[in-house]
């Protein structure tokens, strides 16, 4: 098998490796660099548990060739938590009991992150569409959707508060601003 | 290969007939050209790109109906033309748009209409690749697309139906209709097209026209790979045509 060089950024870390030509990104992540967060489910691009972000876009690592990721930025669940602090999406899934066996969870998290990165305040239909490529056989999806929507609501509160603070600063602290958060 | 949604999954499945991937890195394959009258989509343009390109807004519902976001980021226009039924919804839309497929091979560049392409896509000359599709830019309000699937929002099609219906003073002056998941490839519904001409697209017109679509449902057409058995596709066509997205009637009507 021909070896080819690949170089990319995985969760903020530069990676340069020689890989077998035709290797999938999933195999690269799991077998080559030891990131086991992306799961090997159907290997058919159907279940979504191998979902990772490539340059911010959700992609299915099991049907993506690693050679097509050269120079790209890869994000997996391994890069979500900052030290001991969970990412807001991880915390929301925990708070809403949205993981049972947990096999689909990495894919769900990355699909949801792709949505919230591009659209911080999605509605329910947008969340359903964003998760439509990810299969869960335990939860019935409802707790997962509620968890993602709760992060959307938190984002809205944070943005409203930040706008209020910015307006306060712009007025030099004069005047009163009432910030409504629902 | 295009985005890998067909070929890589076959390799993962253990298909030993595939020994080599040929990846095409030509930037032109990913380009979209929108001129006054013509649109040209490179074969490597993804469904995700189509869904977010303002000039292709009329095709966004078609692109968004294909797979989940992970699939749409990889699935390409060229790959979709080779997708086995019941997949290949984008080809259904291209069929009503009277698209031409640009094929480059050892003999040079060749252009074939999509209906011919679908009949011969398994016999492409060795070394040939699909590089682009080209079609006339439609009036966005003339184009309609409906997909019916068992799994919402993005399951495989039980039926996808695309239509290009031009109206003059309220009457249908020209109609092109294509059906997906009703045969091995997307197919035109010529009888349904003829029955809808000169109508005003009222629910009653649709109901009558759909009856004539029975003649479009040849035995081959009725053998849908969606469930692997012969079935009557008439009720599905009827349901598809009756959907508001197809009729495009004002709310008051």
Image: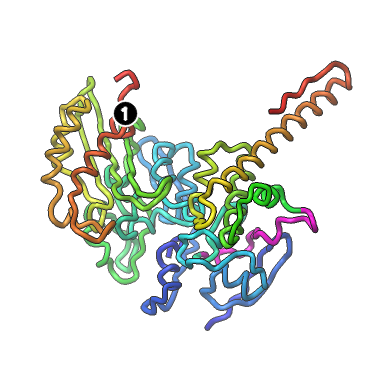
Q: Which residues are magenta?
A: A64-85
Residue at image position (60%, 49%) is A112
The image position of residue B243, as x and y in percent, is: 30, 34
Residue at image position (63%, 49%) is A113
**Image position of B2 with respect to A144: above or below:** below
Q: Is residue A66 visible?
A: no
Q: Nearer the viewer, residue B239 or B245?
A: B239
Q: Residue tagged by mark 1?
A: B248
| Residue B224 placement, left or right of B153 | left
The image position of residue A175, as x and y in percent, is: 85, 16
Residue A167 forms part of the magenta stretch: no
User: Residue most toward the right?
Assistant: A173
Q: Nearer the viewer, residue A139 or A163?
A: A139
Residue A79 forms part of the magenta stretch: yes
Q: Chain of mark 1?
A: B
Quadrant of the rendering where the C terminus of chain B is positioned: top left
**Image position of A88 with respect to A28: above or below:** above
User: Residue most toward the top?
Assistant: A175
**Image position of B186 with respect to B241: above or below:** below
């Amino acid at each position: 098998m021909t070896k080819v060089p690949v170089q990319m950024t995985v969760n903020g870390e530069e990676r340069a490796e020689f890989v077998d030509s035709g290797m999938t990104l999933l195999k690269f992540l799991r077998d080559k660099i030891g990131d086991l967060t992306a799961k090997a489910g159907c290997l058919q691009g159907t279940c979504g548990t191998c979902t990772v972000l490539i340059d911010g876009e959700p992609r299915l690592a099991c049907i993506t060739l690693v050679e097509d990721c050269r120079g790209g930025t890869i994000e997996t669940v391994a890069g979500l938590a900052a030290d001991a602090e969970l990412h807001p999406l991880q915390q929301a899934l925990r708070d809403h009991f949205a993981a049972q066996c947990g096999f689909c969870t990495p894919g769900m998290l990355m699909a949801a992150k792709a949505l919230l990165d591009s659209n911080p305040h999605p509605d329910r239909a947008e969340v359903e569409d964003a998760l439509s490529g990810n299969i869960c056989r335990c939860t019935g999806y409802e707790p997962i959707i509620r968890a993602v929507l709760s992060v959307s609501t938190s984002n809205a509160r944070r943005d409203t508060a930040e706008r209020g603070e910015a307006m306060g600063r712009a007025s030099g602290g004069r005047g009163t601003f009432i910030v409504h958060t629902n | 290969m295009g985005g890998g949604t067909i070929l890589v999954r076959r390799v993962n499945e253990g298909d030993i007939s595939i020994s080599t991937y040929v990846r095409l890195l030509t930037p032109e394959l990913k380009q979209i050209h929108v001129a006054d009258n013509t649109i040209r989509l490179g074969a490597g343009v993804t469904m995700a790109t189509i869904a977010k390109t303002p000039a292709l807004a009329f095709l966004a519902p078609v692109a968004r109906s294909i797979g989940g976001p992970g699939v749409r980021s990889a699935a390409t226009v060229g790959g979709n033309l080779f997708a086995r039924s019941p997949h290949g919804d984008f080809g259904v839309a291209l069929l009503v748009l009277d698209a031409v497929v640009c094929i480059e091979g050892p003999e040079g560049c060749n252009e074939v209409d999509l209906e011919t392409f679908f009949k011969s896509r398994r016999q492409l000359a060795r070394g040939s690749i699909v590089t682009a599709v080209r079609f006339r830019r439609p009036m966005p309000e003339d184009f309609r697309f409906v997909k019916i699937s068992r799994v919402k929002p993005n399951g495989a099609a039980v039926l996808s139906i695309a239509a290009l219906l031009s109206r003059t003073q309220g009457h249908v002056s020209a109609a092109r209709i294509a059906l997906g998941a009703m045969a091995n490839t997307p197919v035109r519904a010529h009888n349904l097209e003829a029955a809808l001409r000169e109508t005003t697209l009222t629910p009653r017109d649709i109901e009558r026209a759909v009856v004539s679509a029975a003649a479009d449902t040849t035995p081959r057409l009725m053998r849908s790979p969606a469930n692997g058995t012969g079935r009557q596709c008439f009720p599905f066509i009827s349901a598809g045509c009756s959907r508001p997205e197809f009729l495009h009637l004002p709310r008051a009507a």
